[in-house]
Image: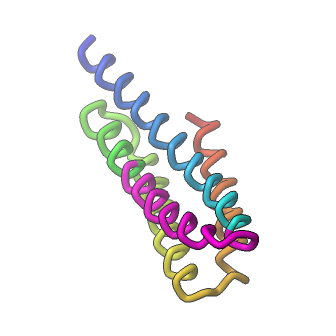
Amino acid sequence: MATQVTAQRGFSFLRIAIALQTLTIFLQAISAGLLLTSSYGETLHAVGARVMYGASMLYVLAAVLAWKPGGGSPRPVWHASGFLVLASVQVVLGIAHVPSVHLPLGVLMFGLSVLALARR
């Protein structure tokens, strides 16, 4: 019974972490549009990048917590780690001002995050 409650709580935290990551990636798309049209868009996009990266780290933490105590599959840990790698590449590409790769990677990350959320 306790294992089931722990696994359910971990699952819930994992789902919340994925939803938060998905939301932050979506907000980054909005702030990218503002980046092109307003003076405060760059600041908003830079702050959003930090929040999105933090959400990706939270996803890794939630995946580990759902896996270890609950005895679940390590697959979510691999998915979360992959997202953290993609987020790292995304940040580097953004800082280097490489929009030809940065933008499609952002779209890919959003799609993968929505897919991960739908699977949970």
Region in magenta: 35-58
User: Does the segment drawn in magenta span residue 42?
Assistant: yes
Residue at point 51%, 70% (across, down): 46
Q: Quadrant of the C terminus?
A: top right
Residue at point 24%, 33% (across, down): 69
Q: Nearer the viewer, residue 110 or 77?
A: 110
Q: Nearer the viewer, residue 78 or 51?
A: 51
- Picture coordinates of residue 22 (x, y %)? 58, 48
Please identify the dominant SS of the magenta region: helix
On screen, residue 62 above or below 35? above
Position of 51 with respect to 40 (left or right) is left
Q: Residue farthest to the front? A: 39
Q: Nearer the viewer, residue 61 or 26?
A: 26
- Picture coordinates of residue 9 (x, y %)? 35, 24
Residue at point 65%, 76% (across, down): 102
Position of 77 with respect to 65 (left or right) is right
Q: Quadrant of the N terminus?
A: top left
On screen, residue 62 above or below 39? above
User: Does the segment drawn in magenta span residue 88?
Assistant: no
- Picture coordinates of residue 88 (x, y %)? 46, 72
Colour setting: rainbow
- Picture coordinates of residue 85 (x, y %)? 46, 69
Residue at point 57%, 79% (across, down): 94
